[in-house]
Amino acid sequence: MTSVEVKNWTPEYYITNQSVCQQILDNPAVLTEIPSLNNVQLHNIRDKELIRFRGMVQDMYDPEYYFKHYEVKNTNTGESNVRCGMYADTVQHLPHEEIMFYSDKNENSERLTYVVISIPGLNDWAKEKNTNIQISNTTIHNTNNNKRSLDDNEVEEMDCSESVTKKEKVSADDQDVNMSNGHSTKVQNLLSKDHILNFPVPIDGGKACIIKVYDETVLKLNQVIDVIGFVSLDPMLSTIYNVDEMNEAEVHTHNPPVSLVPRLHTVKIIELTKSKIVNSPEIMSKAQLIRSDLHIILSQLLFGDNLAADYLICHLLSTIYMRRDYFCLGTFPLNITNFPANKLKTFPKEFYNFLTLFVEKSHFLEVTLENLNELALIPKKDYICNRLTSGILQLSNNTHLVIDEIGLTTGTLTTIGKENYKALSDLLMFQKLMYDFKYYTMEYETDIPILIFSDVKSFIPCPMRIILNIDAESENLYTQVVEAAYQYLKDENRLANIHQYIETLKHTEFVFNEEITKVVQDDFVEMRSRNKNIDADNLHALMVFARLMALSYGQTTLNTECWKKTVQLEMERMNRLPQRER
């Protein structure tokens, strides 16, 4: 079977030729021939078609029980045969056939079930373009076959929790749905599209999918994956439930319309930990030239501050490379202050817009007193809908979080405000986030670079604060500076190089050789002799900074020259700080 024909596979063909099909799917070129749910509208996809979906695991449900094999009897002839129930939600039988539910030939099994959503914060340039996608001419239609749910005892109680009607705010309505004796239609009206999709942040054209996994693959929350599988678009799926086991809110949450949340029976899952850069050796060889381009853009956008541009480049390359208890190496959060907020109130947002051109995933979070007291930052479990309500901070690794504190004023924090403050502080300091399961909390590790813009020192403890040294001419001509920067980036090769530069160096192996260790130790002793406030945490931060500085120039080890330059930059940064912060 050629790769062109892969889009015509059926579940039956795959089951019969599973080993050969898996070998074919190992070829990345073949996968591009499969329609992508990210790009194609559902009405252009036929039921049981092989499709792809790239997304983030947002929730996990309890295992789903189904008939792996079941016996069907022809009531006219008395003959029976055993059929396979994999990769489908319903069993099909003709009017003159009946399912032998108590046959010894039936085989029960279970499949893991997850909710996967479009990747939150994925920037436009990083989205797969709608190329090489051939849309099927067929339309979705119902067969005349009788269908029954494959679930042996319907769907068991499922695992994690709620959804949200106002995605950016905590909604009181989420707590007030009365399930005791309302009708299904009434409940369905209360469960809005936003509730069902349950995105942590707004996603333009975003989609959700319930995937069903048959092998031993165990996925984690917030993991980014590529799923290949057979789509199930049977409208009856939204009405299959057992009201004795679920309340109505849970029923409609877990059995949403397939037109909104299709089911996908997986045959292959690809875990995406990092992008594959084909020409990474070439990128490494010209890293200094690409860095120079990036430095020019960032320094101009930061009002001519070259020091701040150096730190920001390192921030863009940062990722955790070692964890030990609550200590994680590789994170490089920044707090940028002293920009002309009164004159340029939209500066943080304008700067963020440029960052979206450089990094794959990002989110802009405006922090005000009102938002702190109202925003749903932390994912929480809702036991009524039996689902995990996404919070704004439920983001996949390497999603750059940019926080704007310009509008933050003094005032009183509510209980929610205090929880949100702690969540932001823990995220920045420890790269961990506590999910709220009402009766207990569960800790999840993260790797989310954080950049904070604030008038004065951020209210979130950030060890690396940069006070901008503003060039007056750049400030006065800032509108022209922004226009010039956009013009500079119209060169597609320049922008593509920056994309590959960030992604390649972020995941490049780095080694601290023994030769530099003695130099580092001597310099650290000298620094402590001049400033008694410098401690081991400062040394760790300086080593992370030095590593990132070396990487930014395409170096895989730290040499004395780069170390000295790093120390010089850090001394300059600290000299800008008030005496009490040094």
Image (tube, rainbow, N blue to C red):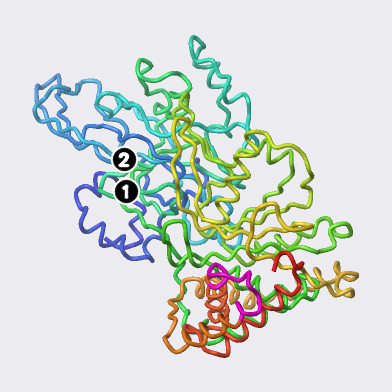
**What secondary structure characterizes most of the magenta part?**
helix
Would residue 392 be found to the left or right of residue 257 on screen?
right
Q: Nearer the viewer, residue 20 or 563?
A: 563
Label 2: element kind: strand
Would residue 103 be found to the left or right of residue 38 on screen?
left
State the residue at coordinates (17%, 35%). 69
Q: CA distance from mark 2 to mark 1?
A: 8 Å
Q: Magenta span covers which residues?
A: 527-539
Residue type for callout 2: Leu
Q: Which mark is residue 112?
A: 2
Q: Which mark is residue 373?
A: none
Which is more N-terminal, label 1 or label 2? Answer: 2
Q: Determine crowd level at label 2: few under 14, some 14-19, many 20+ residues with C-alpha closer than 10 A.
A: some
State the residue at coordinates (47%, 79%). 280
Q: Nearer the viewer, residue 538 or 124?
A: 538
Asked if 107 appears above or below 572 in the picture, the reply is: above
Disc 2 and disc 1 in contact, CB within 8 angstroms = yes
Residue 496: image location, x then y, percent? 59, 73
Residue 502: image location, x then y, percent? 56, 72
Residue type for callout 1: Val
The residue identified by callout 1 is 218
Would residue 543 be found to the left or right of residue 338 on screen?
left
**Does 533 lie within the magenta span?**
yes
Residue mark closest to the camera, 2 vs 1: 1
Asked if 479 appears above or below 394 in the picture, the reply is: below
Asked if 19 appears above or below 322 in the picture, the reply is: above
Q: Nearer the viewer, residue 498 or 536?
A: 536
Q: Nearer the viewer, residue 158 or 454?
A: 454
The quarter holding residue 471 reads bottom right
Label 1: element kind: loop
**Does 378 lie within the magenta span?**
no
